[in-house]
Amino acid sequence: MTNIEKQINNVTQKIAHAAMQVQRNADQIQLLAVSKTKPVSLIKQAYFAGLRHFGENYVQESIEKIKQIKQDDDFKEPLFWYFIGPLQSNKTRPVAEHFDWVQSIARFKIAQRLNAQRPDDLAPLNICLQVNISGEATKSGTTLSQVIELASQVSDLPRLKLRGIMAIPEKTENIERLEKQFDELHNIYLTLQGLYPQVDTLSMGMSGDLQSAIKCGSTMVRIGTDIFGARN
Ligand SMILES: *Cc1c(COP(=O)(O)O)cnc(C)c1O
């Protein structure tokens, strides 16, 4: 077994355990492998271990890897690519052309550009709105008070499909404080689902806070470090 395989097994067990503790079905929690800064050789190991969904943060780096993987015969089944990093308006086109999801939508202008640039022969681009739940000035994301309005604007764009919300809570050792933020996100998620029935994704939880996120209703955890090791 490769190292990556072992780490994926560990993460899968952690997800199963966290789900069991709150009587949730682990099948309802998708594992997104965050491969930013990691080479295609490691993505290939994760692919052979069964993973198909990968998250990336940097436009140029990710497009190079996606193109390389498309031409690599070892990848027999398609991968699904999720853009989860900050996105500047002058870099939206390659993302619209190569990704299946963008989870870091914080401004309508970015959504409009992705909508206009999404190629006609591809399915609509799946979208999550990024919510700045901790209110930290340094974090990107829309505020709690703006998320419903942004959702209503984005839901009118035909080449995008609103699937839910994504958030990175503040780094804190205070579990109660952390879970309060996750609970708030879960509430917004339920509100959005009431308004837009296609909403099915609450993307929260990373290597350090997966258990709390699952306890509070996450449907997708984004795991980098615990699968691929620390980044430089
Ligand atoms: C890097 C990153 C992750 C993965 O974080 P780890 O702590 O390495 O698991 C998840 N989500 C986003 C948005 C990221 O940028």
Image: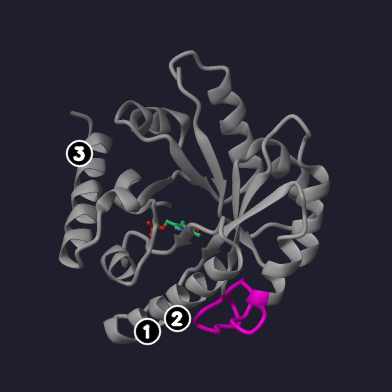
Mainly helix, strand or loop, the magenta region? loop
Q: Is residue 145 magenta?
A: yes
Left or right of 64 on screen, residue 48: left
**Residue 188 percent across, percent down from the top left:** 51, 76
At label 2, counting other C-alpha atoms closer than 10 Å, the crowd grade (few under 14, some 14-19, many 20 or more) is some
Q: How is the image coloured?
A: one colour
* Mark 1 residue type: Lys
Which of the 4 image quarters holds residue 186?
bottom left
Which of the 4 image quarters holds residue 174?
bottom left
Which element carries disc 3, helix, strand or loop? helix
Mark 1 lies on residue:
180
Which element carries disc 1, helix, strand or loop? helix
Q: Residue at x 37, y 53 (%)?
A: 223
**Residue 14 percent across, percent down from the top left:** 20, 55
**Residue 105 percent across, percent down from the top left:** 65, 62
Name of the residue lying farthest toward the top: 73
Q: Which residues are magenta?
A: 132-148
Q: Residue at x 17, y 60 (%)?
A: 20
Mark sitting on residue 6 = 3
Q: Disc 2 versus disc 1: distance between alpha carbons?
A: 6 Å
* Mark 2 residue type: Glu
Of discs 3 and 1, which sits in the foreground?
A: 1
Which element carries disc 2, helix, strand or loop? helix
At label 1, counting other C-alpha atoms closer than 10 Å, the crowd grade (few under 14, some 14-19, many 20 or more) is some
Ligand 1 shows up in which quadrant of the image? bottom left
Mark 2 lies on residue:
184
